[in-house]
Image (cartoon, coloured by chain):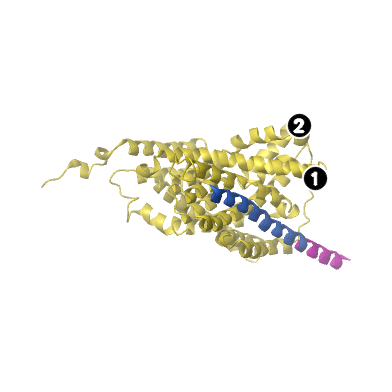
Amino acid sequence: MDISASEFLGFLNLDWQIVIMLVIGCVLLWLGIAHKVEPVLLVPIGIGCILANIPLGGVAEKGGFLAILSDAGIHTEIFPLLIFIGVGAMIDFGPFLSQPYTILLGAAAQFGIFGTFFLAYFLGDGWLHVLDFSLKDAAAIGIIGSADGPTSIFVSTTFQSKYTAAIVVAAYSYMAMVPIIQPPIIKALTTKKEKIIKMPYVKGTISQKTKILFPIVTIIVVGLLCPKATPLIGALMFGNLLRECGVVKNLSETAQNELANIITILLGIAVGGLMIGSQFLRPETILVFVLGIVAFSLDTAAGVLLGKLMCVLTKGKVNPMIGACGISAFPMSSRVVQKLGLQFDPHNHLLMHAAGANTAGQIASVVAGGVMLMLVPIFS
Amino acid sequence: MLNALWIVILGMVIIFVVLGILLLVMIALGRIFKSKEEKQEG
């Protein structure tokens, strides 16, 4: 019998790429467990990354369990949609409905998606050709700026981007970095006078009928105007309708807990399974992470700048800092603005207004994803 | 690059239009229900 030991001993098949990916997997676990950075996602992703890179393990190869999960849930785009049902059931759109103008802040804060898309395409096939970024790859990279994991997965898998794994890891890990990325930009773009603007909040003006109609109306309006966003907005608003209609409490609780938790486990480990060394370790991956920071920064800046415009138009009634919450990193972004407000005036509570902009950003980011899916094929 | 620029411009315009219409619809609905509730209370 002519058998080589390297055919059955994994460590004999180690190469530098595998070693680096095993280290990356361990770092993700360390961030999740020791530093509690998005542990719900980074722990499954970290384990998936380690499993996928064990030589001869075969879990990420055709027929392996991570490959099956990936084929069934990521490539079919089912997992992000199911997660969105859970997210919709968790979100209270009350603060947004009592200040609906905040949806404009959400719209402005999507500029990070398009600005980053333009930059990525400029660096890639569009102009410089220094990186392997096609128009679809650039769109998938830009969508990191949606600050929304399920939307990032949905758009990048629809475009069949080579960088899906890096995009998803960047989207989720940067959400945990919102408290680091946003404050310097908010501080730089606002004056001291603007930072201390107080915004009184009147609670309880939204009727239950409005709360029930909101998800239905949103599905119809967004679906008719931007059909490509229908799967995402439909799943998100279906979850919200379960929450608000008041007659399916069990379904709402299941969507918020069991469904969201099960899909998070499967999605996380399947995304980790996409992090295979030979595909992940490329110069472009590093650029994807850099562009992710650019996307979050541009989102923040655009939201604050529209907030400044609103401040001028309302003669100082809008604190521009809440514009930063137009990115849909819910609820981290609202907390950042609340904290900043208190930092400059210990009696200035901006949380509810910030939460309004934040939940509006959730809807806006889904629409932005749909717009990308609509426009990119037209201009390809 | 021109196609990318069009995507950026049209993308932002469409987002503002879609969300602007949603805003108007929600404001209208809010007013309808508010006035109905006020009538019932009155």
Write the start and end of the magenta stretch as one range: B29-42
Element type where label 2 sits in the image: helix
Q: Judge left or right: residue A78 versus residue A93.
A: left
Q: Which chain is yellow?
A: A
Residue A21 location, quadrant = top left
Determine the colour of chain B: blue
Residue B32 colored in magenta in the image: yes
Q: Position of residue A51 (x, y in %)?
A: 36, 45
Which residue is more in the foreground, A210 or A123? A123
Q: On residue A192, which mark appears?
A: 2
Residue at x 48%, y 58% (from the top left corner) = A77
Q: Position of residue A158 (x, y in %)?
A: 48, 56
Residue type at mark 1 is: Leu
Q: Judge left or right: residue B6 versus residue A17.
A: right
Q: Magenta residues: mostly which secondary structure?
A: helix
Q: Position of residue A224 (x, y in %)?
A: 62, 65
Furthest toward the front, the residue is B2
Q: Which chain is home to disc 2?
A: A
Residue at x 59%, y 53% (from the top left corner) = A368
Residue type at mark 2 is: Lys
On the image, numbered disc 1 is attached to which residue?
Answer: A313
Q: Judge left or right: residue A255 versus residue A68.
A: right
Q: How many marks are shown on the rendered structure? A: 2
Q: Could you tell me if residue A91 is visible in this image?
A: no
B32 relative to B13, above or below = below
